[in-house]
Image (cartoon, grey):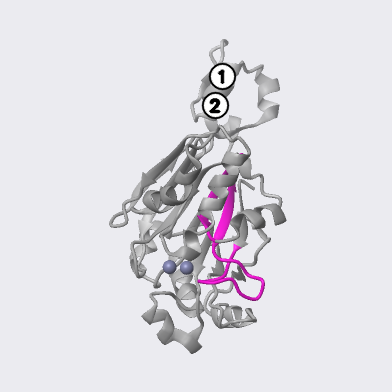
Amino acid sequence: MSFSLTILGVNAATPAFGRFPTSQVLQAHNHYFLLDCGEGTQMRMSDFSIPRHKIQQIFISHLHGDHVFGLPGLLFSYDLNGRQTPLHIYAPHGLEAMVAAQLRPGGSLSYPLHFHVVDTQSSNLVFENETVTVQAIPLKHGIPTVGYVFREKPRPLNIRSEKIAEHQLSIPQIKAAKSGEDVLLENGILLRNAELTLPPAPLCSYAFLTDTMADDSVLPYIEGVSLLYHDTTFCDDFAENAALTMHSTARQAAELARKAGVGQLICGHYSSRYRELGVFLEEAKPIFENTVLGEEGMRYSV
Ligand SMILES: [Zn+2]
Ligand SMILES: [Zn+2]
């Protein structure tokens, strides 16, 4: 397991039935990424033992309040706790002004805060580190909105430990084998890479597509992802509302998941019209069997 997703808030628009507005934490190797920051995100982090000080990047889908109103409180708490580690926020244009207006009365922060404006018209690589890339993709919603696709970078091959002992391989020879090269021994024997290594585990990927109409134009970007979280604000009974508010139904999300050939679909961003969530699964599963409900506090392994 290389990715682990914890959902902190899964409701649409307003808190209801104990459910909070949108927020998630994706753990990718040793990095923690916050996705959206609805009201109550800090409290949910405490409830679910998220190490909030380890978060260095926050990715915001769009500026509707149910996705950003938790930010001022979180940023303020980091300051109160004397945070010094820089924090980077990726979001469509306008977030910096929104947040700065609320933080300014307190003066400067204890840590560097960097805003990165994400292009909402075309797909772009917005972040990468040694193990992960993050791509923003345009979504169809009432205001400029993006989804984020996290992909694990290719890993080195696994060396077969018995071959190290058998051929007394040196560290440079092991490194060469792990990067795919053949190894020439001092006695002139050439060891083919295929006999020295085993393929790495399949790469993980996660797509976070909240607040959007189901739209086939995202297919090239999410094809084959291991895990897809997709807007399912409504079911068929409110399909008209879904179209009017530029959201999706569970059926539409499942059809998209099937077309994209994803590993698993997580439903979420539920309208407060729904107290019980079973209807989302009843609608989605006949179309895409490997569908699960997004539930707060649940950890989804990728
Ligand atoms: Zn929303
Ligand atoms: Zn929205």
Q: Would you place residue 260 above or below residue 28 in this image?
A: below
Question: Does the image show residue 95?
Answer: yes
Q: Residue furthest top?
A: 186
Determine which of the numbered discs, if any, sits on residue 177 in the image: 2
Q: CA distance from mark 1 to mark 2?
A: 6 Å
Q: Residues within 10 Å of mark 1 (few under 14, many from 20)?
A: some
Disc 1, SS: helix
> Is 15 situated left or right of 60 in this image?
right
Residue 286: x percent and y percent? 56, 81
Q: Residue at x 49, y 30 (%)?
A: 180
Residue identified by numbered label 1: 173
Q: Residue at x 42, y 84 (%)?
A: 241
Magenta span includes 179: no
Kindly indicate whether the residue at mark 2 contacts the one at mark 1 (C-beta within 8 angstroms): yes
> Is 281 situated left or right of 261 in this image?
right
Q: Quadrant of residue 169?
A: top right
Identify the amino acid type marked 2: Ala
Residue 103: x percent and y percent? 48, 47
Q: Residue furthest bottom?
A: 237
